[in-house]
Image: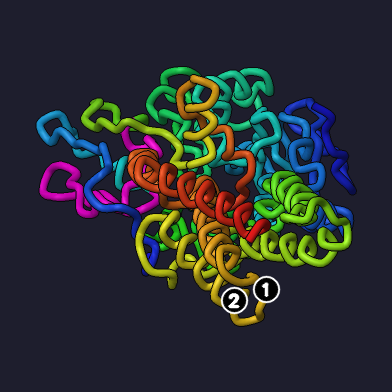
Amino acid sequence: MKTQRIRNLSFIEHSGRKIPKVPAQLHLSDWIGTAKVRCGIGRMNYAVDPGLYAVGDPDGDSPVFVSANYKLSFDALRKELGGLDGWILVLDTKGVNVWCSAGKGTFGTDEIVNRVGIVGLETIVNHRRLILPQLGAVGVAAHKVKSGCGFSVVYGPIRACDIVAFMQAGMKATDQMRQVRFSFYDRLVLLPVEFVAGAKYVLFAMALFFIMSGISARGYSSGLALHDGVRSMFNLFAAYAGGAGIGPLFLPWLPGRSFSFKGLMAGLLVGSVLALLGLVGSGAEKVAWLFLVAAIASFVTMNFTGASTYTSLSGVKKEMRVAVPLQIAAAALGLGLWIIGRFV
Amino acid sequence: MKGQEYLRNVVTLELDSDKCVGCGLCVIVCPHRVFEMGQDTAVIVDQDACMECGACGLNCPAEAIDTKSGVGCAYAVLKGKLTGGEADSCCCDESDSDCC
């Protein structure tokens, strides 16, 4: 994996070794990089080199913070460490963030033991303590790190922005620091990536409906395709926006607990607005759009479970057993009615 | 989190209080405050809030916690069904939600 260059890197001498020192302030290019990644551009290739870095002016007694080599995670940490002197041990998590790589096990016990050995951490610091982000615990067994390399693990706060308060409190985290959130803003920044993820399927469906819109009992007419097709494309896009936008953004306020139900509600909302705007045609086509929009929005919001911070696998499987057959049935019915609508 | 409670009574989390040594690590690592320290052992106080991430079980030195852990991701479950594999954490790449 190609790694990103860190701007304004310098070097410090410690224990007879040259160690790269990163600034605690982000460079303009770091912010631009973050913005691009948030939009889904080059997101899978946004890594920094694993290894040991210095921030501030650390010595042998300074704390060691462990991070992932996803540049967003790394930047989030170093930006918050301003004013602290410490070491950052960057693991090779294949350019994936802490929580997700911990789920895969790449941010894990073996990699920590391995990386501590590679950088020779015992020759750098006098203490034997690593501070990990709490969410790293999904991939790390603290007692096994201790037996593996002699370093004990202290789980720090979940969010890098709490790290200074955590250190000042004598490495004690408040209950709030230990609880994962999923705020409106958290969901908002995920939207562009979610939108891009499913875009190719939606564009394909839109193109298909555009072409099919030319079909009628009188044969094929490109004029009809243009007239009805644009409307069809808009409706499909609105359904997708309902599932990928309204569903995630208004998650806590949409009724129900399962994501597919919340998505259904978002879909019904979108469908009603489309009907009010007179975009759903009449007769069979009207009913068709109701089913299609509901099915699409429900399915798309259901897929937001993966990005959410509180859905369990058991719960997701349970809701899917009910929702997926219904979504398929609704979509098939909607498509059938829509085709019938072309001929009546 | 208000308005962010997932399905009830589905979670596979189990705590064997006979094995628990009371180290409190599960209380620390849980991102949803499912555990609290009781008299001598940890106790589950909010079972339904569990997202089965598995951090508690992995960090329990006494192996007192059992979860069928995994990532609650519909896309991964679908992909697993379609390709015949187990539900994996693959779609997790799409989320950066742990960053501040």
Q: Which residues are magenta?
A: B31-57
Name the residue at 57% across, 32% down.
B90
- Distance CA(mark 2)–CA(mark 1): 6 Å
Amino acid bearing label 2:
Ala
Percent position of residue A264, x then y: 46, 61
From where the camera sits, is residue A210 visible? yes
Q: Is residue A293 above or below residue A1?
A: below
Chain of residue at mark 1: A
Q: Are discs 2 and 1 less than 8 Å apart at CB?
A: yes
Total labels drawn: 2
Q: Nearer the viewer, residue A117 or A31?
A: A31
| Residue A162 appears left or right of A236 | left
Give the labeled residue for mark 1: A279
From where the camera sits, is residue A247 visible? no
Give the position of the N terminus of chain A as an image quadrant. top right
Give the labeled residue for mark 2: A275
Query: In this rendering, do the residues under marks 2 and 1 share a single chain?
Result: yes
Which quadrant of the view contains residue A238?
bottom right
Name the residue at 41% across, 28% down.
A141
Amino acid bearing label 1:
Leu
